[in-house]
Image: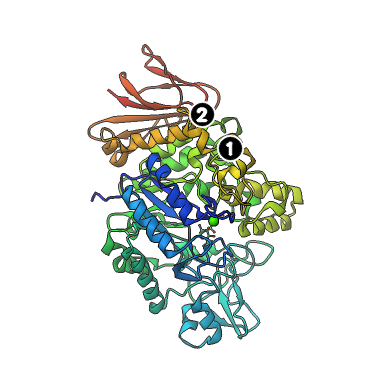
Amino acid sequence: MKRKWWHDKVAYQIYPKSFYDTNADGIGDLRGIIEKLDYLADLGIEILWLSPVYLSPFADQGYDIADYYQIDPRFGTMEDMDELIAEAKKRGISILMDLVVNHCSDEHIWFQKAIADPDGPYGKYFYLEKDDGQLPCNWRSYFGGPCWDRLPGTDRLYLHVFHKKQPDLNWENPEVRNEIYKNINWWLEKGLGGFRIDAIINIKKALPFHDYPADRADGLSSIDNMLEEASGIGVFLQEMRQQTFEKYDAFTVGEVFHSKAEELSSFIGEDGFFSTMFDFRPVCFSSSANGFYDYRPITPEDYKQCIFTSQAEAQEIGFYANVIENHDGPRGASHYLPADGCHDTGKKMLATISLMLRGIPFIYQGQELGMENTVFSSIEDIDDINTLAEYETAKKAGLSDQEALSAVSKYSRDNARTPMQWTNGAQAGFTQGTPWLPVNPNYTAINAASQLADENSVLSYYKKLIALRRDSRYKETLVYGKTVPFLAGQKNLTAFLRQSDQQNILVLANYQSAPQEAALPFKRFRTLLSNYPDTVFDPKKECLTLRSYEAKILLEL
Ligand code: TEU
Ligand code: CA
């Protein structure tokens, strides 16, 4: 396998709006990120992905871009951005921007020109169809309702698979693709390390537009059916890579849902479309075509199955990017840990698993503190358009207000979007003003300042895990070594070996509160890291007793 500069890095996702506010307007900003670069460097981060900071009306929190060449004034200026790239570089950190090119904002000049002249060149930048009283197809938008809306003041409809303020760009039009590549190269010229690539699987539509069997009472069909049928996306992705990323040796991580197993090597194999893509298998496990109200919790055994399947599938091909949370869902600690394990010890165990897997770890802001889901006391507390749509879906399915609220609370994207908890002071030290989204009330117990001062905190443990990955003695094994499941049939034990020619490293996690024994595959070992200060080992039985949510990383001697 060709070695690449990103293989041994740990990445971190910033949701700028909620990271750190320096001018008291309640919204995080670029200067806030610059101020916290030392914190991130100290944690061991070498790649930093920023969710969108481009000019945007914020219908979907910046995932609706009005100008790809401008920074939104809420976040700062282009000078701030340049300074951020330069300051990060000084600390050995590469910046990734979010590449949102399935759609733009309806306030983008291209869409405005399409409205003014639907038959002109910009009409071809979008998917426009004559409005003959019937929708061109019955796809349901990801945020609820049909994917078609009237192009204002015209007799046309336009396609939006997300919000109506996010019209889909027509990738079949080479002019659109060239505009996108030009933009990517413009940013790479500035010294970016690369991009996280949003909703990329949606760029290829199964054409001509047609209906699929309705799957809800609304008569619409999930877009998944279309994605299943669409083929030929590789032509676009290959062209994009060749015209942009490849020339700069840029790092790219694809947000790829619904990829087909046989396509994995074209996506992330050597010379694949992307450097890596997120492993969403555990996320998809919980989801349901019916919506949030029908999502199912994931058990430790399910989670183990998911990660082992993904590890096996990718290891001969390339690298997955491993995540337990991002800005689109619940907090990892709340989602993946049983209620009796959602404490510091359990959070450290979950971190051990996620960061010791083969792949490129992405940590989402606050994950390193063990931030948890927040509490919504009414639907008024929710800002996110996706959650609001899911709430309506739940009610239409017959749930009461209270039931619907409780169902969507578990999966709401706002759980991840509450402000970063820096201190135990007012507004968790996030802002001197009023935060755009209320802080999670648990900030007095969970915050960076107290954890920085505590050798045994979740944050300190994350630092040790990252340091271990970067340690030259183990790096080869932890980065390139195989993942070999161990005692996979033993319930609520998640164990695997990381193996290279030089060494064996065993990761053990007791994913429950009851203790359990684990027979070791070797007699002599040294503990590299654990969430307990000591080890209960019976040398006669070559057996280790793991206590409640105990995790161990052992080096065979
Ligand atoms: O998400 C793409 C996507 O598929 C989401 O709709 C996802 O299924 C949903 O958020 C799960 O709750 C990306 C971004 O990450 C998301 O924040 C944007 O809203 C979306 O694209 C549109 O740009
Ligand atoms: Ca601000």
Q: Tell me the colour scheme of the image.
A: rainbow
Instruction: Determine which quarter of the picture holds residue 444.
Output: top right
Q: Is residue 114 visible?
A: yes
What residue is shown at x 42% (from left), y 53% (from top)? 49
What residue is shown at x 50% (from left), y 83% (from top)? 123
Towards the viewer: 404 or 213 = 404
Disc 1 marks which residue? Answer: 424
Crowding at dot 2, Cα within 10 Å, few <14 / some 14-19 / many 20+, comes out as many
Left or right: 238 in relation to 112: left
Amino acid at the residue labelled 1: Asn
Task: Please provide percent x and percent y for residue 421.
Answer: 55, 42
Q: Is residue 253 visible?
A: no
Q: Is residue 202 above or below residue 283?
A: below
Q: Which quadrant is home to the C terminus?
A: top left
Disc 2 marks which residue? Answer: 345
Task: Please provide percent x and percent y for residue 391.
Answer: 68, 55
**Mark 1 vs mark 2: which is more N-terminal?**
2
Amino acid at the residue labelled 2: Thr
Q: Residue furthest right?
A: 400
Task: Please provide percent x and percent y for residue 440.
Answer: 62, 43
Q: CA distance from mark 1 to mark 2?
A: 21 Å
Give the structural element (helix, strand or loop) at label 1.
loop
Crowding at dot 1, Cα within 10 Å, few <14 / some 14-19 / many 20+, comes out as some
Q: Would you say the residues marked 1 and 2 are in contact, meaning their CB atoms lie under 8 Å apart?
A: no
Q: Is residue 446 above or below residue 180?
A: above
